[in-house]
Image: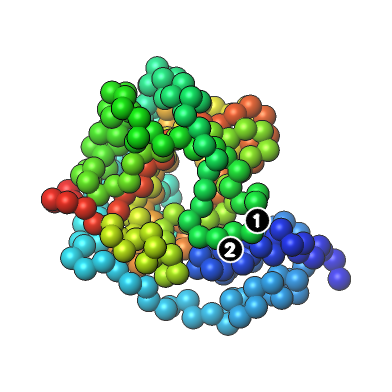
């Protein structure tokens, strides 16, 4: 039988993504692409292997949230500057030159001076799952950071009170963020989303261009976006009825040459005052 068997690192990756309720079909597609044998994949996934999982199982939504309006926010009405990616599986938009070169350079300087190891929500025995460094930009009193925060909020048309603090990430050669979703699944909700609700939109801006690698790959959609300085990738983590969308499964691909800098901001279901 041709193909590889999953080693302990990949088995831990499977366990992590099954627990995060990522798309089982997406998990199989990734492993098959990596050249693993299907019987090895089936063994690692157990009852979560496609065909043995109830894909229609509903997940809780926050009361009082207008999800349909949330799926039709300002960025979705602005084709002249926000390009929608052609797919029916998710709402994904690209914005060229969202930040100026000067803004990108200033934020990179701040990130470099305030880095810590990146973390993930939930437990993982795979130390290679996310290997970047993070800067908590929202904790730094700087007018440039504050202006970018406001600029992101205005581009979406969602109030800042319905968001998390802005973050910066740095990836060196060999660093990555394996396939994951940004929303919180049922097991994570109580710890990470009971107060502010689930993540709705993700807004990510590339601060530089990598020499090789470092793309953002949406695995179930078959789209990969490579860093363009100042360009933004923006997506809705939910369906228009509020259910988490497993087709937003994505990865920060390994940087092969150079370094990658990004900023990320996540919006939430709950906040103070009007959402829009």
The image quarter in which residue 15 lies: bottom right
Q: Label 2, on which residue?
A: 16
Q: Label 1, on which residue?
A: 126
- Near-viewer residue (79 or 141): 141
Q: Is residue 227 visible?
A: no
Q: Position of residue 140 (x, y in %)?
A: 35, 30
- Which SS class for mark 2? helix
Q: Position of residue 98 (x, y in %)?
A: 36, 30
> Which residue shows up at 31% across the image and 27% down it?
141
In this image, 173 relative to 240: left or right? right
- Near-viewer residue (225 or 268): 268
The image quarter in which residue 219 lies: bottom right
For mark 2, does the 10 Å Cα neighbourhood hold few (<14), some (14 to 19), or many (20 or more) residues? many
Farthest residue in the left direction? 273
Q: Is residue 202 visible?
A: yes
Labels in figure, total: 2
Q: Is residue 139 above or below residue 268?
A: above
- The colour scheme applied to this rendered structure is rainbow
Farthest residue in the top direction? 102
Earlier sequence position, callout 1 versus callout 2? 2
> Which residue shows up at 38% across the image and 21% down it?
103
Q: Is residue 23 above or below residue 179?
A: below
Q: Position of residue 64 (x, y in %)?
A: 18, 65
Q: Which mark is residue 55?
A: none
- Which SS class for mark 1? loop
> Which residue shows up at 21% across the image and 62% down it?
65
Which part of the image, by quadrant, shows the N terminus?
Answer: bottom right
Q: Are marks 1 and 2 in contact (CB under 8 Å)?
A: yes
């Amino acid at each position: 039988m041709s193909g590889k068997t999953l080693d302990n690192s990949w088995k831990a990756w499977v366990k992590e993504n099954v627990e995060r309720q990522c798309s089982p079909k997406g998990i199989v597609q990734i492993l098959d692409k990596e050249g693993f044998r299907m019987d090895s994949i089936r063994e690692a996934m157990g009852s979560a292997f496609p065909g043995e999982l109830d894909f229609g199982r509903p997940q809780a939504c926050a009361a009082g949230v207008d999800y349909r309006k949330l799926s039709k926010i300002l960025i979705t009405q602005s084709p002249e500057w926000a390009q929608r990616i052609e797919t029916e599986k998710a709402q994904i938009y690209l914005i060229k030159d969202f930040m100026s070169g000067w803004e990108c350079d200033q934020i990179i300087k701040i990130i470099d001076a305030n880095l810590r190891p990146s973390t993930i929500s939930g437990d993982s025995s795979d130390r290679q799952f996310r290997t970047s460094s993070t800067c908590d930009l929202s904790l730094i009193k700087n007018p440039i950071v504050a202006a970018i925060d406001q600029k992101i909020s205005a581009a979406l048309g969602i109030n800042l009170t319905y968001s998390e603090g802005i973050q910066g990430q740095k990836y060196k050669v060999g660093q990555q963020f394996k396939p994951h979703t940004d929303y919180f699944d049922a097991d994570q909700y109580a710890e990470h989303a009971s107060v502010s609700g689930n993540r709705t939109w993700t807004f990510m801006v590339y601060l530089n261009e990598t020499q090789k690698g470092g793309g953002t790959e949406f695995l179930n959609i078959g789209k990969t976006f490579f860093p363009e300085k100042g360009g933004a990738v923006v997506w809705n983590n939910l369906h228009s009825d509020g259910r988490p969308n497993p087709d937003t499964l994505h990865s920060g691909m390994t940087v092969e040459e150079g370094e990658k800098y990004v900023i990320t901001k996540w919006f939430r279901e709950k906040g103070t005052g009007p959402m829009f």
